[in-house]
Amino acid sequence: MAHSHQLQRAALRAAAEPERLAVMHETMLPREFPGGRLRKLRPSDHEAFQAYRGIPDLGRYQGWVPMSDAAALDFLAGMAQAPLFATGRWVQLGIADLQSDGLVGDIGLYLSEDGHSGEVGFTLQPSAQGHGLASRAVREALHLFFSTTTVARVLGITDERNLPSIRLLERLGFEHIDTRHVVFRGEPCTERVYALSRNAADPSPEPTRP
């Protein structure tokens, strides 16, 4: 009988674990860093989100494509409610201006089915580029990712012509591990695969300036 009770308690703990993790993850955002804030996306971001995601040059090498207004609203509403770092899923986080909290970009993080690896992608509107904001935001997101999951490494995959993304990944300590020839949007291209291991990741993100 005692063994049966132990099994029941173990089953209850297992059933409660996803909810416990969801609550824990919800307390992890927003996170501030110099010049910006990492937070959940929300429907009120719709205008800003559509403005930069509709810029052809910005999306040239991205895995996403522009959405209709209705689809964008659905996406933002979904991300506002999505749990952080569910296995086998991407979650998109917002990069916001520290003063206005207005959306200026987003970061996607993918956790593999087995929870051992991840992938990162990032987009920043042109007017916010050139000031180190993307590097600080991605560093903050990776710190959150590594500290709340068991991933051993995170991949960053980009077209070899996307030099700003390559430079950002290298600044954050990603190492080039592979080059592959693929077809992207119907055209042949060359992708560079970068990886950042847990041991090589910056253990302490840059603190917020007072």
Image: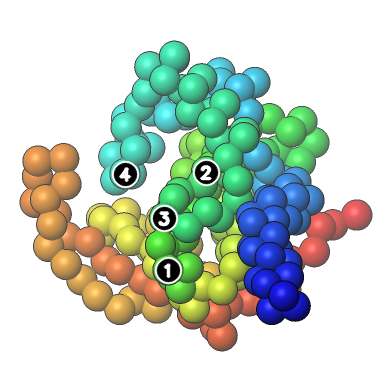
The percent position of residue 136, horizontal first and vertical second, equals: 63, 58
The percent position of residue 64, horizontal first and vertical second, equals: 34, 38
Which comes sooner in the sequence, label 3 or label 4?
4
On screen, residue 140 above or below 100: below
Disc assigned to residue 88 = 3
Mark 4 vs mark 1: give the one in front: 1
Which comes sooner in the sequence, label 1 or label 3?
3
Q: Residue at x 56, y 73 (%)?
A: 150
The percent position of residue 193, horizontal first and vertical second, equals: 30, 68
Identify residue for label 1.
Answer: 114
**Residue type, numbered disc 2:** Gln
Cα separation between marks 3 and 4? 17 Å
Please rate how many residues cluster around mark 1, counting C-alpha atoms within 10 Å: few if below 14, some from 14 to 19, many from 20.
Answer: few
Q: How many marks?
A: 4
Cα separation between marks 4 and 1? 23 Å
Classify residue 152 as left or right of residue 56.
right
**Residue type, numbered disc 3:** Gly
Identify residue for label 2.
Answer: 92
Q: Closer to the camera, 147 or 34?
A: 147
Cα separation between marks 2 and 1? 20 Å
On screen, residue 92 above or below 191: above
Quadrant holding the C terminus: bottom right
The residue lying furthest to the bottom in this view is 199
**Residue type, numbered disc 4:** Gly
Disc assigned to residue 63 = 4
Please rate how many residues cluster around mark 4, counting C-alpha atoms within 10 Å: few if below 14, some from 14 to 19, many from 20.
Answer: few
On screen, residue 6 above or below 169: below
Question: Could you tell me if the residues under marks 1 and 3 are in contact, i.e. CB atoms within 8 Å?
Answer: no
Mark 2 vs mark 1: give the one in front: 1
